[in-house]
Structures are given as structure tokens and as C-alpha cells.
Image (cartoon, grey):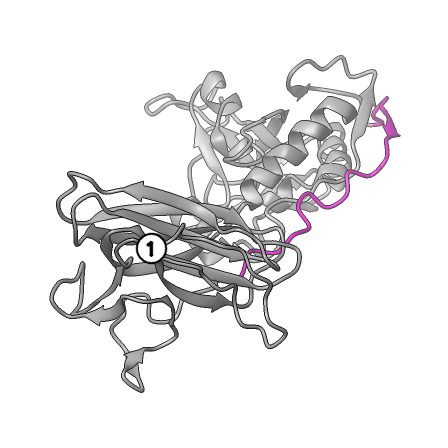
Amino acid sequence: MAPGPIWRGYCLAAVAALGLGGSGVAGAAPAAPPLRLVLDRSWGPLVEEVPVPPVSLTNGGFEELAAGAPLGWQRWGAGLLRDEREAHSGRASGYAQVPEGAAPWWAPAAEAGTGAGPTLAAGAFWAQPLTGLVPGARYVLSGWVAPAEEESVAFLGLAMGQAGAPEGRLVGLSGVAGWTQVRFPFSAPERGSVWVLAGAARGAVRWDDLQLTAVDQREQQAADYWLAQLQTEGLPYTGLVVDARGLGLQRGMSPRILAEDGEVLYAGLGAPDELVIRRGVVSYATSWEEAIAHPRLAVGSAFPFSRPLVVRASRLAAGLLPTSVVLDTASAWLVRTLDARHHFLARYAVVFLVDPPGRGPRG
């Protein structure tokens, strides 16, 4: 997904004297359209947040060494070593063993002013500081763990802030054979240091292939935004359906929508190459139901609300190929005016309703 907003909302145009229901349908009308637009307040940007930048752990597989120790990792507690006897992938894993008879595995302690992490009263944990987290952004910490002793309990999580108890998952491995994936989702704190902890709360375990993944929540944010807007502002137009049945319109690589005076209302200019190749600048439907429900007309996959404006093509545009249509003056004015408020053409949300195969133009 490209950086920046997924979609943008614009001013809501409340159309009076149209008598429209779920979809706006424009048919034959006088050259001077008897329409009055009452503009409501701006919808504003749909999603203002940028994508969460990727953040990665250093040496999550314990493969790299620096001065005889796993690169990027610190040892919190005893019984920690790089183990080449068994690994989920690669050559090594991070072994953690809690000393027998150890005291409770966590005792909060204030962080030192040098940025060192909280100290552990007991237990065995591989620790790594995280930098570059976006406050409030969502992440998933994951890794693979295997028991090295019976009745072992593994821990995967974080130590956040000053003197804070760790947050994470305790995983009992009694009766478990082999490797098990553990996932811990979290929101980055507004301030304070964050440390990854992977180790043993009891017994002995091996950790491998630890990863940190940023969760891109823009689609959920978009869905929340649209829901709130629809509840408070009313209904926007999300796309355009052009009814070209009976005209003999054919599918083509460069379809256009024109006004009677020759103005190009839509040609898909600026469309990304991927969209042009995979979907084209318009989609085609052969039934009313298919056209109105086409997913291209929805505001997005996270919130599939759809309310298309429907207009009737008056004739085919002159040219070598019958792939473009002309709208009468009233319909062209309507498309131009509503698109200026809702910008559905900028999202390439256009569907042509055409004749089924084998049915020619009207005589």
C-alpha cells in the first residue's frame, strides 16, 4: 500500500430536488439543470496518519556473534547462552535456564540514567532495547520457543517505562514437543524505553526467529472515520455508473467520458500502471445489479460502503473505436459538480453498464 492517506473525503453535497434514493440517477433533463446544491461543511482528510515505519530486531535468530555473544542481545540473569545444539532455523538459538530454587522471577527496579533496562531479581531473559517505535502505533512481537526441560514456562514480552513490570505472554510448555510460535501484540508507549524480553520464567527454553512487525492500521482507521462521518454527515457519492446499454459500446484500453461540447470529463489520466494493467481505468458490468454492487464503487475494502451516482450516456463518442461515451449537458454538469465535492473520479471509481455479449445496439 502506498504511503499517505488511503482515500480523502471532501465536502458533502446535499442535492435538493433530485429525489434520489440509495443511488443518484440522472436521465434526460433540460439543458439548464434545475438543480440547487447546498454544500455542507468539509469532510477533511480521511486518514492523516502515515504508514507505520518498519522496525526490526537485531539478530532475532541468534546467528551473529559480537565479542563471543549474540549480537544485539543482553543477558538478564544467569543461564543464558547461544546454543548450537538445536534451532528452529539456521544454526543457533537463544538458550535460557532459570536457576533451580530461584526467587520470584521479576522484581521491579528503577531504570538507570544511562538507559540500561530494568534488572531482574531472578529468571533468565534475553533482552534487547527497541528504538524507532512510533508512539501509539501497533506492533506484534513474535518468536518460536521449544522446551529444554520438563514443566518449563516461557515468557515473551516487553519491559516498558521506568520500574514497570513486564508485559507479555507466559507460555506453559508442559507436554509440548518441538517448536511453538508465540505472538504478543502491543501498542508502543508515548515515552520511556522499551525492551524486548525473551526467556524462561521457569525451567529452561530455547528461543529462535524473534521478529517485530509493525501493524498498518490505516484501513481500520479509514473504516472508523467513514462510520463516524456517515452517522453524523449523511451520504456521499462514492462512484459513477454510466448506463451505456443499447449503444453498442465496446470494451477498450482507453475509454473516456465526454460532454456534448467535447470536454473530457474522465479518461483515467494519472492512473497507476498497476491499476491500468490489472483493472483498467473503468470496469464493466452487464446487469444493473452487478453495476450498482461493483466493489470498485465502494470507499474501500475496510469499509465497503457504496452509493454511486448513475447517469445515462446519450451516444457514443466519435472515433475509430466505439469505446467512449458522451453525456448530455445536464448529466455532464451533474457529474462535474458532484465530483468536485466527492472526488470519486480521482479514485477511478467508474463502471460502464454495457450490453451482454451477443446483444447489439438498439436500432
Residue plotted at (57% across, 45% down): 218
User: In front here: 208 or 247?
Assistant: 208
Quadrant of residue 298 in the image? Answer: top right
Quadrant of residue 360 in the image? Answer: top left
Give the labeled residue for mark 1: 102
Please, is residue 317 above or below residue 17 in the view? below
Q: Position of residue 113 (x, y in %)?
A: 63, 74
User: In front here: 321 or 25?
Assistant: 25
Q: Position of residue 31 (x, y in %)?
A: 81, 27
Query: How many C-alpha atoms fall within 10 Å of the one at disc 1: few (<14), some, or many (≥20)?
Result: few
Please, is residue 185 above or below residue 4 in the view? above
Q: Is residue 19 magenta?
A: no
Q: Is residue 44 magenta?
A: yes
Q: Position of residue 37 (x, y in %)?
A: 86, 28
**Residue 236 visible here:** no
Helix, strand or loop under label 1: loop
Q: Left or right: where does residue 296 sit relative to residue 127?
A: right
Q: Left or right: where does residue 27 sit relative to residue 360?
A: right
Magenta residues, as a range?
A: 32-53
Residue kind at label 1, given as amino acid type: Ala
**Residue 203 visible here:** yes
Q: Position of residue 16 (x, y in %)?
A: 84, 19
